[in-house]
Amino acid sequence: MEYTAKSIADLLSGQVIGNPNEKVITISKIQEAKSGSLSFLANPAYENYLYSTSASVVLINKDSVPDKKVTPTLIVVDDAYKAFAILVDIYQKLRNIDRVGIEEIAFVSKSAILGNEVFIGSFSYVATNASIGDKVKIYPQVYIGENVQIGDNTIIYPGVKIYQDCIIGKNCIIHSGTVIGGDGFGFAPQKDGTFLKIHQIGNVIIEDDVEIGSNASIDRATLGATVIKKGVKLDNLIQIAHNVEIGENTVIAAQTGVAGSTKIGKNCLIGGQAGFVGHVKIANNTNVGAQAGVVKAVTKEKTTLLGSPAFELSKFHRSYSVFKNLPDFRNDIIELKNELEKLKQKL
């Protein structure tokens, strides 16, 4: 599709510097852009590319107007990165706009309810009493279990499995290979050393505007619901156990694991490979560093944790200044011990 600089600026409430009729047909990184490309400059570290890029149009922040001559037409906006995100979102939606209808070899139960302009790809399965909202896109090889509800404008990418009774909100994106509603890890130890399975009869509730990366696993609750609140963003390869609750707008990076019944507050930032023990509560606006192991509740908001086991940032830095020098301390202690033995012998 073809757009002019002026039409893009109007969409973003931006100001054109250069040719308002300059046309773009694709989106590219500023260092790789060719003629006909739209790009953006948000990081000052990339400013040099602004003077050498072949892009036709570049979005820039209003506080970073160049002091040299540039070839591309510029669109000045308050936040170039945000503006770029808006354009990419529109671009992605336009790519999916023609995907409507049920492809061959897809199965849809007669009791399922489908909204308007739904797309269901080949080899997908929509079970009894499932409810699919308007403009939902279900790509091939997706399984939608009994009584599942999916809200308007949600996109389910290939290979996703959503077990029975789970609820997915509006405007969600679930990437390939993710499993929602599998059994939580519940087993009761027996006297003979075996384990009795505790069936998980709850569900998973995912609220609006949630995005879940590929190959994540969100377990259904033993009783009640595992809840992912509005606006949460989960990276790839994340494990969310039964009865966990993730608060609004919390962001969790890849390979993190959250054990059962833990409650994570809203607006938290959690680094990759972090781990949480079960049955703890994490306050709102908590930051957890990569590979941190959270083993107790966090009650104070805006706390930052590092380390495994994790503890508060300032204490971690003080401790780190000590344990990074432990080999030297060991050598010093050995020398002191030897000196002490020599003194004992003289006495």
Image: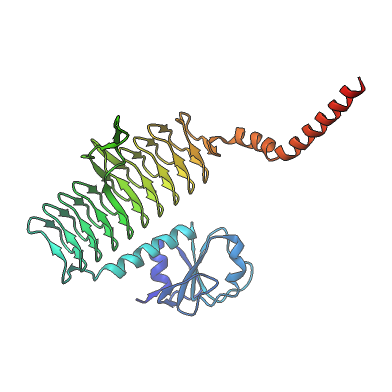
Q: In which quarter of the image is the N terminus?
A: bottom left
Name the side, left or right, on which 269 lies relative to 49. Answer: left
State the residue in front, 20 or 312: 312
Residue drawn where x is 29% and y is 31% of the image = 190
Name the side, left or right, on which 194 lies relative to 317. Answer: left
Residue 143 at least partly seen: yes
Residue 95 point in image, percent of width and height: 31, 70
143 vs 37: above or below: above
Residue lying furthest right in this view? Answer: 346
Residue drawn where x is 54% and y is 38% of the image = 308
309 vs 85: above or below: above
State the residue in front, 193 or 79: 193
State the residue in front, 206 or 196: 196
Name the side, left or right, on which 331 lies relative to 167. Answer: right
Residue lying furthest left in this view? Answer: 110
State the residue in front, 93 or 329: 329
Dividing the picture into quarters, in which one does residue 244 lie?
A: top left
Residue 158 point in image, percent of width and height: 29, 63
Residue lying furthest top in this view? Answer: 347
Dividing the picture into quarters, in which one does residue 185 lie?
A: top left
Residue 88 point in image, percent of width and height: 39, 64
Residue 57 point in image, percent of width and height: 48, 72
Q: Quadrant of the C terminus?
A: top right
